């Protein structure tokens, strides 16, 4: 019997790869220290056995197949789950300068001067920096053109480019004007239609969600306020978005700066709230009661110094005074949120151009929590297990545990004794594949 040429080729490919499946190479990682994100504690001496993309076992003196297992003894490092940033914007960049007029200026420049293709390519470059800084997953929340973030996610998933797991929202759903200000009415319409999904009324809210479902986004983002613009979505519009998203099994996260915006988002039934810079005790209690996750977004002092300097505050004495005053306010807020018992996840929301890579900026933003006095064990939970829940991947990401995906990083030394070790990532594994190993 003669077989078509295509079938013969297919059989030859299967025969070629079949032995690789039978004799899959295991990896055994060893380290002197580790972080247990489920319990929120540090421990000593750990072994993690990995096959392909999955963790097979975690413990001490593990059994493994001799001759079929690569042993990597990392030594004096702290092993922990890959970090997760719940709030990024990797397809946009803010270039601060004296006279900067605000985020609207950044949106205008990116939309007018750059194609979606260029922005996706720039995003790919930034994504790689996240991975090498220990972020094995990030959630990107809009300002990414017309679904260019979806294309970038797909390229990473298909191993065309190197980057963390990417979970994307597409254009955020907003009221008239979005966050673009300082333009003519006509220009505003053109610009916002490229970076936001602007709606008017409940039927358009339903249509916007369906557009996102069609394009296979991972999460629906809404703008509960449009600061600096005064336009906002109504509670009914927000509720309609949440209900339609729920019908398609998608979570909704809300951009909310003001207390009223947070309150509206809670009443609408969103799953998480971004920023919440202004939030009263009453609203905070409501957030906690409804088991909604907050993702505060602040930068540490080092980054704040650079940002204020780029904005034109050259005098170091004056800049120190401004940075310290700003840091004092945000530290009190972060400590308040920590003590409130509300569920928290880490998000950097850092998209400004600095002397550091985007991934380094995200890592430094973690230190805002530490500067506020929040224990490092809690902060690491915000950036691992809690953040994994925002990705709807709580059962496979954010924990070193049997059955979870092998997204694992290591930092130099004992992280429980030296918080600065978090900036010294020496090993990165995603999906069982090693992307960085300085040992």
Image: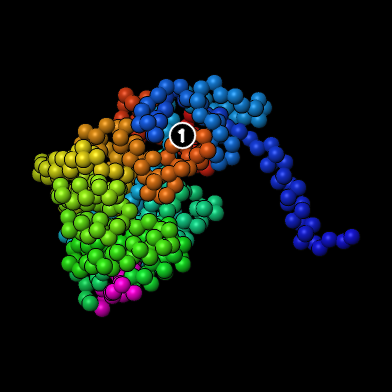
Q: Quadrant of residue 114?
A: bottom left
From what the image shows, is residue 64 above or below residue 119? above
329 lies left or right of 122: left
Q: How is the image coloured?
A: rainbow
Overall secondary structure of the magenta stretch? helix
108 lies left or right of 283: right
Q: Residues within 10 Å of mark 1 (few under 14, many from 20)?
A: many
Front residue of 111/205: it is: 205
From what the image shows, is residue 99 above or below residue 208? above
Front residue of 196/61: it is: 61
Q: Residue 146: where, in percent of width, then height?
A: 40, 67
Q: Residue furthest bottom?
A: 186
209 lies left or right of 307: right
Q: Is residue 416 visible?
A: yes
Q: Is residue 314 magenta?
A: no
Q: Describe the element under mark 1 as helix, strand or loop.
A: loop
28 lies left or right of 363: right
Q: What residue range appears in magenta?
A: 186-203
Q: Residue at x 26, y 78 (%)?
A: 186
Quarter of the image with the N terminus is bottom right
Q: Residue at x 56, y 34 (%)?
A: 56
Q: Is residue 433 visible?
A: no
Q: Residue 30: where, in percent of width, then height?
A: 50, 26
Q: Residue furthest front?
A: 289
Front residue of 216/78: it is: 216
Q: Is residue 199 magenta?
A: yes
The residue pinned by badge 1 equals 400
Q: Quadrant of residue 426?
A: top left
């Amino acid at each position: 019997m003669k077989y078509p040429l295509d079938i013969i080729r297919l059989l030859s490919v299967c025969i070629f790869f079949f032995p690789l499946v039978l004799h899959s190479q295991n990896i055994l990682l060893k380290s002197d220290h580790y972080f247990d994100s489920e319990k929120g504690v540090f421990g000593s001496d750990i072994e993690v056995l990995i096959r392909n993309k999955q963790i097979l076992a975690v413990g001490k003196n593990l059994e493994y197949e001799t001759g079929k297992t690569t042993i990597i003894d990392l030594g004096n490092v702290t092993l922990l789950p890959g970090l997760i940033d719940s709030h990024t914007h990797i397809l946009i960049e803010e270039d601060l300068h004296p006279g900067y007029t605000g985020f609207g200026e950044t949106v205008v420049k990116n939309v007018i001067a750059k194609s979606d293709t260029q922005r996706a390519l720039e995003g790919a470059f930034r994504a790689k920096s996240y991975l090498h800084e220990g972020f094995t997953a990030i959630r990107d929340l809009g300002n990414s053109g017309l679904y260019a973030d979806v294309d970038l996610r797909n390229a990473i998933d298909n191993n065309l480019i190197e980057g963390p797991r990417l979970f994307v929202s597409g254009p955020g759903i907003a009221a008239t004007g979005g966050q673009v200000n300082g333009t003519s009415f006509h220009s505003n319409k053109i610009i916002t239609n490229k970076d936001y999904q602007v709606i008017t009324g409940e039927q358009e809210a339903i249509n916007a969600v369906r557009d996102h479902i069609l394009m296979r986004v991972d999460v629906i983002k809404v703008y509960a306020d449009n600061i600096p613009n005064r336009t906002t979505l109504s509670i009914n519009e927000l509720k309609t978005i949440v209900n339609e998203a729920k019908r398609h099994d998608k979570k909704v996260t809300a951009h909310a700066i003001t207390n009223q915006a947070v309150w509206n988002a809670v009443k609408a039934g969103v799953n998480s709230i971004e920023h919440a810079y202004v939030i009263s005790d009453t609203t905070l209690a409501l957030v906690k009661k409804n088991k909604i996750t907050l993702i505060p977004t602040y930068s540490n002092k080092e980054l704040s110094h650079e940002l204020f300097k780029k904005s034109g505050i050259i005098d170091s004495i004056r800049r120190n005074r401004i940075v310290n005053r700003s840091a004092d306010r945000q530290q009190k807020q972060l400590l308040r949120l920590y003590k409130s018992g509300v569920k928290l996840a880490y998000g950097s929301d850092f998209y400004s151009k600095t002397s550091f890579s985007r991934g380094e900026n995200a890592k430094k933003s973690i230190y805002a929590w530490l500067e506020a006095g929040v224990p490092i064990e809690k902060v690491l939970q915000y950036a691992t297990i809690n953040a994994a829940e925002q990705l709807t991947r709580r059962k496979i990401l954010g924990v070193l545990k049997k059955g979870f995906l092998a997204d694992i990083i290591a930092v130099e030394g004992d992280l429980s004794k030296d918080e600065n070790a978090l900036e010294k990532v020496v090993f990165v594994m995603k999906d069982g594949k090693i992307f960085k190993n300085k040992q």
